[in-house]
Image (cartoon, rainbow, N blue to C red):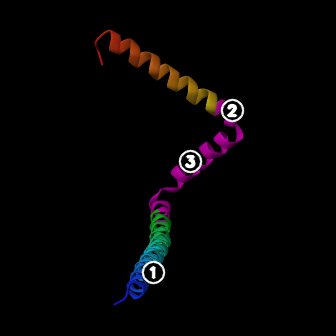
Amino acid sequence: MSFREHQTVVAAQAGLEQTRDRLGERAGRLAAKADVKRAQDKAVEVTAGVQQAAAKTAHAVQEHTPEPVRQTVAKVAWVCRSHTRSVLVAGAATAVGVFVLRRRFAREGRS
């Protein structure tokens, strides 16, 4: 084999190796895309299942909750929606009060 033929073979081998590398990278990217697609499909499936279970649970709770309790909850929800600022202030005041009392009891060793 002459020097020129040897160089041609070496160049062909290098080109072949480079082509294999590129094909490997492309195959990896395609596999990753397929995995992402499968994961997305699975996420949609799981989400649908969770939503269906939540709807069933909500329906079961509604069925088994006595009417007076449902009416009271509806009234409380209406008051909270109507007086959002007052409810937030009362909640914040309660949180601060609990925080202060816990710190006070912790300092006295009663926690």
Q: Which region shows up in magenta?
A: 58-87
The correct choice, above or below, for 56 with respect to 105 in the image is below
Q: Secondary structure at mark 2?
A: helix
Q: Which residue is mark 1?
A: 15
| CA gap, disc 1 and disc 2 | 72 Å
Q: Indicate which disc, 1 or 2, sits on the residue closer to the N terminus.
A: 1
Q: Identify which amino acid the numbered label 1 is placed on.
A: Gly
- The numbered mark at residue 73 is 3
Instruction: Tell whether position 69 is magenta.
Output: yes
Residue 3 horizontal/vertical position (percent): 38, 84
Q: Earlier in the sequence, mark 1 or mark 3?
A: 1
Q: CA distance from mark 1 to mark 3?
A: 74 Å
Q: Left or right: 49 with respect to 107?
A: right
In the rendered image, the quadrant that contains the N terminus is bottom left
Q: Nearer the viewer, residue 42 or 35?
A: 35
The numbered dot on residue 45 is: none
Residue 56 lies in magenta, yes or no?
Answer: no
Quadrant of the image occupied by residue 86: top right
Magenta stretch: dominant SS? helix
The percent position of residue 45, horizontal first and vertical second, equals 47, 74
Q: Which mark is residue 85?
A: 2
